[in-house]
Each structure stands twice: as C-alpha cells, then as structure tokens.
Image: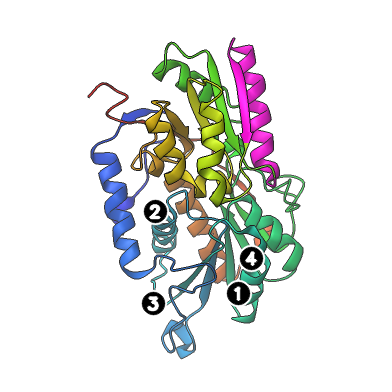
Amino acid sequence: MRGLGRNQRGSGVTRTGWALAAMLATAACAKGGEGAKSAGADSTAAAGGGGGGGGAVPVIAIIRAADWIGSEWSEDALKVGLQESDLEQGHDYEFKISSAQGDLATLPSLIDAAVDAKAKVIVTLQDETLQAAVQRVKTLPIVFNILSDPFAAGAGKSDSNHLANITGVYSPGFGDPEQTKRIELIKRVVPKVKKVGILFSPAEPLSVGLKDKMTATAKKAGLSVETVPINNVSEGTEAVTALVGKKVDAIEIYGNAAHGAFESIIQVARDHKVPVFSPSPFEILKGATAAFYPDFQQGGVEAGKMIARILKGESPGKIPFYRLTATKEQVSEHAAGK
C-alpha cells in the first residue's frame, strides 16, 4: 500500500474524479481483508507465530465510534506509516478492528474487549472513542486519530503535556476551528444561499460545539441558521424533513448519529433539491454536494508512525500530539457544473 504515499500539504480544491476513484480503490482493497463487520465484530484476528521472537504477532486494536468517515482509507494510511517505519503486517503487527457503528453506548465494551485481548496498542478513531478510552484504560498505550479535540476528552493539557499512555493526531474543528471555511465553501458553491440548515447530534459535545461555531460564523457572514437535532440513526428521515421544511438553502451535518443516517438524509435532501455539505469526502460518493476536511491520509500516516514507535518500545508520554493543519476540499461534479 505504499502507493498511498503522502498527499499534497496545504489547502487545495479538487473535483471528484481520479482522486476519489483512488480512494474507492484503496477502500475496496481494505474491505477485502480488514473492513469491519458489525458492531463489536473483530475483522482481523491476531495470528500465531511470526513477529520477531516467534510468539504471537502484536495486536493493534482499532476502535471506531462510527464508520462514516472512510474508515478503510484511514486504516490503509496507518499501514503506510507502519510500513515507512519498517514494520510489516502479519509479521510485526496485526489489526483487530471493531466499531460501535454510531451506538456510542457500546464503546466501553469494545475498549474492554481490546484490553482483554491483550492488544499492544489501542487506536481510537473519533473523539467519543478516545473519551471512553481515557476513562477505562490507564496504562495500555493509546493512539488517537480522526479527532478534533483530545483535550476535551481528558487526554492532556497540551501537545507535550499529556497522559503517559496516550498520543495521537488531531485536527481542531476537523480542519476548520471556527467553521469559517465551511461557510465560505457553501457560499461559493451555492451563491444565492441565505439560510443554512444544520443537523447535529445533541448527545455529542463535539457535534454541539461545531454546530454552535458554525451558527455564529454563518450569522457574521449575513446568513440565517436553522438547526435540528438527530439523536440516533433511525431519526434521519424525520430530522432532515423537519429541516427542509424550514426552507433552508443548504445543509451541513455534524455528529456520528447524523453521519450514520446519511443515506436517509441525502434521499430527502435530493427530493427537495437542497445541497448537503459534509466533513467527509466519502459522503460525496453517496450524494453530498461538497466536503471540507483535514488531510486524513496524512494524519493516518503520522499516527501509524506513532504506533510503530510504541511497538519499538517508546513511551506514548514522550511522543507529542500531532496537530494536523493540512486541509482539502472536494466538490461533486454535478455541483461543479460537469
């Protein structure tokens, strides 16, 4: 998978085409061997033998809060970071993957299962997973990724002053701390926009925080805002129907519950011809109009290198958090006028 390499740094705008096709190819490759099955299901078991000293191959337990953000892509990026650190899958490590699939109440049991399986490192994807891990794991190494705010989760006070068993990669505001660039993207793609609608998950503090920041930023830009909560995946159709009923010109979505319900949300939005914006490029493939997001690939490679350092004996407490600043945009071909 070395072909993933490093994406260009800095902010850039590309349209769907070969870039997203490459993402799909990578995801399909990962699904063939290591895609998650169901909530709590392990997709890759630790293999016996191999691994340097002839014992069991060290297990890297990857735990997702939800699968909405292109999980297989991030896992392939982790492999690149491990490979660049001269570690080989099947010999030096094996992935063991599980997902809460948006049901955050199951995260503690998934974390406990990783501890019981004697994982060498736990990789927590998304803020809610790290928060649960901080509460339950005190000594086992943790590396977080696809994350906005490790400090709110209790992982530390600064990039260099953090819990001894935790390190990782984060991107404040998912690449946009004040949500300014998301508003700029909406105004650029929908020039006549006057009212923005936001679907958010009220049980998720990050989702609420992003909603509040986007509301304030939109109002400063002269736009009005309507918000509708979505508490679980089953409420997708009802929530987006309520939002389009408020005559919004564009929709932004935040939170695992909202993203987990994306397919039902996009169906209603299409029926009412309301464009949907997302922090996940993979949701463009499902019908989103545009996405603004951190360079998840770069972040995954950096996280993979952190995992390698830990497997080689380094303490997570001595590895500073990595703040990911590179961002990207994707605009669908339809929105771009193709």
Q: Secondary structure at mark 1?
A: helix
Disc number lying in front (2 or 4): 4
Q: CA distance from mark 3 to mark 1?
A: 18 Å
Question: Is residue 50 left or right of 140 when viewed as pictured?
Answer: left
**In the figure, residue 196 lies in which quadrant?**
top right
Q: Nearer the viewer, residue 196 or 240?
A: 240
Question: Is residue 55 left or right of 318 when viewed as pictured?
Answer: left
Q: Amino acid at mark 2?
A: Trp
Q: Nearer the viewer, residue 313 or 323?
A: 323
Q: Amino acid at mark 4?
A: Thr
- Seen in the picture, residue 22 relative to 135 is either above or below; the reply is above
Of the numbered discs in the image, which one, if any, rests on residue 73?
2
Assess whether residue 221 is covered by the magenta stretch.
yes
Quadrant, the N terminus: bottom left
Q: Specify how the rendered protein is coloured.
A: rainbow
- Span shown in magenta: 203-228
Q: Residue at x 65, y 61 (%)?
A: 316
Q: CA distance from mark 1 to mark 4?
A: 13 Å
Q: Which residue is mark 1?
A: 114
Q: Which residue is mark 3?
A: 90
Q: CA distance from mark 2 to mark 4?
A: 23 Å
